[in-house]
Image (tube, helix red, strand yellow):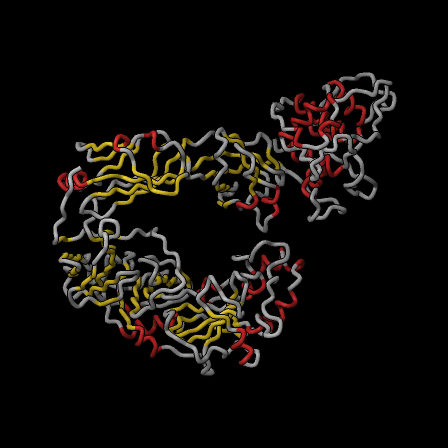
């Protein structure tokens, strides 16, 4: 393709940064030399009230009423304690200060209380307000400094998380903690002792601060120092150990004390001590009486190249507007004249010069942060988020792009590289696999390139232009969802799909009969079975389970690798499992199985005390009765009874039904032997015949050869046992054995029936 020389003098196109741009915090960033304070008016416009130099805010900063620095304690995911000392001011104090120094009309009506929110933008947030707090969240809940989190002799107790849980309970309220965890928390009294020594304090925006972790170890993932030695040198007290180390490096910094719930539920709170704040926006519940004087025009950048240098001139059409710029993150440098950039040895096509700019004026709204690249940007494409596997993919010019601009860029296009989901490297696309459509101003890629689902990344290389990147997610048609025919509260729920990979990356939401929406916890959903997901019984044991009462529930399945990305299925839940028998504990592996068989009435109590009798052997009478009841206890025609099964009894009806259905037979001598125990292969055979009798699919078959004792399986039981293994009703004994002739217990059979119920 022809080369296209770019002009030495070029007015660059600018691109507004999207709100969804990633804004991950780095370990270090630039401090806020100037703080931009906005407030939203009744139309939702963010009006600039004041640009405040950090040095001015330092004059506003203060310590506590007793003159000492503020002390803030936090916990983090090492886990360690983080201690911070700071000087600063509260958010209401900052709002009051802005009111006193701004000349914007109507600013006297701003305030901060109740549900009013303050939105915070860091210098490396690239224009995003990625933290927000209401007054009630910051100041409506008592917050404390906890000196006792760290003991100079004992250190930080790494076992403080709630016993039996995998991580801290972020978001758990104090009431929820007390109701669910308090009784089993072995550190409850230790935490209460720490709380008793807590000092009530309040959140501040710190202009000077310093923090460290209570360890002397090298902290690879943190720029903070270990301060255990400083605490020891301070008499074993963290408070005051950092008083001589305060710096403005992290300004502004939200210093957020802990709540009682943070302490008791082991929340990890260091994340909320947000650093490098340079832009704040006040959103009041009742909009203030601000009157915008207008909107500041977007700034433009004129860039010229001469030798090894670029010269950038910024301009804004709004009279009196101030322009700020930067080459990394938040634009904070005031523009006073041409800016020079050294480009010696730099490949501008592969590594263009990027910078950021904003134009602001008090009393005006503005365009926010503008990102700019040099050399020239390729024409913008129409928004294209996804395509379908095996189908052609078309990138088309955005509406408004001049035909001449499109032609100039495509004439200069040398080649295209592509990174696929399975190859983590860019590979040149063969010329025959894409074509330029001049009439439609489009580039069309052959569908053969897109055989798998996932993210595909393109880079278009054109002479005289910055490399243009584009990413598209290739999807497959969403499969049909097969919901369970019968669902019960507390019993695992199995959904099947036509596509065997649909469960990978799947998120499930549920809408309750009263219209509330909730996401099912991913760690309570089993995705290990291809073509299905199992919503485990643990989903019913949460603090506030979404599925907690009989009724109709709408499930939404979200998988962005498929189109449409959301599919729905409605399931009606009937009453399900009840409370566990007294001799069954929540920690028992058969806990939910016992609740199921007793709640459904499949098992009677083992003895007069009402015990479940988990370890007792399963008898032929017990199993036949359970299967009969699972089949809804159908009426049976009178038939000859076995000699050891009295006529007219409940057992007689169950045995007659099971014999007529081909599930059981006698012992060959006219007896049934109801009290005889049952082996694992006998139980499996009876359950297999029951499944066939009810019309269930019994075609699945597992590999019996995987068990070391497979040779011990009776020939008449092989088909049934293979089915049970394939359906995950039988999983072996955990030692590589299936123990076909071992006697089964009531707990084992209860689990088999529960597993069968989910099929």
> Which residue is at 62% across, 55% downward?
180
Along the line of sight, the residue nearer the viewer: 439 or 112: 439
- Res. 137 in view: no
Along the line of sight, the residue nearer the viewer: 122 or 646: 122
Q: Position of residue 28 (x, y in %)?
A: 38, 64
Q: Position of residue 250 (x, y in %)?
A: 38, 69
> Which residue is at 37% across, 73% downward?
248
Q: Quadrant of residue 185?
A: bottom right
> Which residue is at 31% across, 73% downward?
54
Q: Which residue is the extreme one toward the front?
A: 345
State left or right for residue 505 relative to residue 277.
Answer: right
Q: Is residue 537 above or below residue 104?
A: above
> Which residue is at 19% across, 66% downward?
335
Q: Quadrant of residue 422?
A: top left
Q: Position of residue 300 (x, y in %)?
A: 17, 57
Q: Quadrant of the N terminus?
A: top left
- Res. 502 in view: yes
Q: Quadrant of residue 29?
A: bottom left
């Amino acid at each position: 393709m022809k080369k296209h020389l770019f002009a030495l003098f070029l007015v660059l196109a600018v691109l507004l940064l999207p709100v969804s741009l990633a804004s991950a915090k780095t370990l270090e960033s630039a401090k806020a030399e100037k703080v931009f304070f906005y407030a939203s008016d009744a139309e939702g416009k963010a009006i600039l009230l004041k640009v405040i130099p950090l040095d001015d805010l330092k004059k506003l900063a203060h310590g506590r009423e007793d003159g000492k620095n503020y002390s803030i304690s936090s916990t983090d995911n090492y886990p360690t304690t983080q201690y911070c000392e700071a000087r600063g001011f509260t958010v209401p104090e900052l709002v009051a200060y802005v009111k006193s120094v701004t000349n914007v009309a109507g600013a006297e009506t701003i305030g901060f209380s109740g549900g009013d929110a303050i939105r915070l933008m860091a210098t490396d947030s690239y224009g995003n307000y990625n933290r927000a707090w209401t007054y009630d969240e910051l100041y409506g809940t008592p917050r404390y400094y906890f000196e006792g989190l760290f003991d100079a002799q004992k250190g930080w107790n790494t076992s403080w998380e709630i016993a039996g849980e995998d991580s801290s309970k972020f978001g758990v309220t104090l009431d929820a903690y007390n109701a669910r965890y308090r009784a089993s928390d072995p550190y409850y009294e230790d935490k209460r002792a720490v709380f008793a020594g807590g000092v009530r304090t309040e959140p501040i925006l710190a202009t000077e601060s310093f923090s460290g972790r209570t360890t002397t170890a090298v902290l690879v993932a943190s720029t903070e120092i270990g301060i255990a030695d400083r605490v020891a040198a301070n008499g074993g007290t963290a408070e005051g150990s950092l008083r001589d180390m305060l710096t403005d490096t992290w300004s502004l910094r939200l210093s957020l004390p802990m709540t009682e719930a943070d302490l008791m539920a082991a929340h990890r709170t260091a994340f909320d001590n947000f650093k490098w704040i340079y832009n704040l926006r006040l959103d009041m519940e009742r909009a203030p009486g601000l009157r915008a004087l207008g909107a500041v025009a977007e700034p433009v950048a004129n860039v010229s190249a001469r030798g090894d240098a670029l010269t950038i001139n910024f301009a804004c059409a709004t009279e009196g507007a101030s322009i700020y710029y930067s080459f990394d993150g938040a634009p904070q440098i005031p523009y006073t004249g041409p800016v020079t950039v050294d480009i010696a040895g730099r490949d501008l096509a592969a590594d263009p010069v990027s910078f950021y700019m904003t134009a602001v004026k008090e009393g005006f709204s503005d365009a926010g942060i503008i990102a700019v690249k040099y050399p020239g940007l390729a024409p913008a494409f129409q928004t294209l988020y996804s395509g379908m596997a095996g189908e052609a993919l078309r990138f088309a010019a955005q509406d408004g792009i001049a035909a001449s601009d499109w032609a100039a860029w495509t004439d200069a296009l040398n080649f295209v590289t592509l990174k696929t989901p399975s190859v983590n490297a860019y590979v040149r696309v063969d010329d025959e696999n894409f074509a330029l459509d001049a009439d439609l101003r489009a580039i069309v890629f052959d569908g053969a390139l897109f055989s798998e689902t996932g993210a595909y990344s393109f880079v278009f290389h054109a002479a005289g232009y910055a490399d243009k990147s584009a990413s598209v997610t290739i999807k497959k048609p969403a499969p049909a969802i097969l919901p369970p025919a019968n669902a019960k509260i507390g019993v695992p729920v199995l959904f099947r799909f036509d596509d065997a990979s649909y469960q990978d990356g799947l998120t499930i939401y549920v809408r309750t009969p009263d219209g509330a929406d909730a996401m099912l916890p991913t760690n309570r959903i089993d995705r290990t079975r291809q073509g299905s997901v199992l919503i485990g019984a643990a989903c019913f044991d949460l603090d506030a389970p979404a599925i907690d009462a009989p009724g109709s529930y709408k499930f939404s399945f979200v998988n962005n690798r498929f189109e449409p990305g959301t599919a729905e299925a409605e399931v009606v839940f009937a009453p399900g499992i009840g409370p566990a028998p007294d001799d069954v504990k929540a920690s028992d592996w058969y806990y939910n199985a016992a609740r199921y068989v007793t709640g459904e009435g499949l098992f009677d109590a083992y003895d007069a005390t009402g015990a479940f009798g988990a370890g007792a052997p399963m008898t032929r009478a017990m199993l036949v009765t359970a299967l009969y009841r699972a089949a809804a206890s159908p009426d049976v025609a009178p038939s000859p009874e076995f000699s050891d099964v009295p006529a007219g009894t409940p057992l007689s009806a169950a045995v007659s039904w099971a014999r007529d259905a081909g599930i059981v037979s006698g012992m060959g001598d006219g007896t049934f032997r109801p009290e005889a125990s049952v082996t694992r292969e006998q139980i499996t055979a009876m359950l297999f015949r029951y499944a066939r009798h009810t019309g269930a699919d019994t075609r699945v078959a597992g590999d019996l050869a995987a068990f070391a004792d497979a040779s011990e399986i009776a020939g008449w039981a092989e088909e049934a046992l293979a089915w049970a293994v394939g359906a995950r009703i039988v999983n072996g004994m955990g030692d590589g054995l299936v123990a076909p002739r071992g006697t089964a217990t009531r707990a084992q059979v209860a689990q088999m029936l529960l597993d069968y119920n989910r099929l």
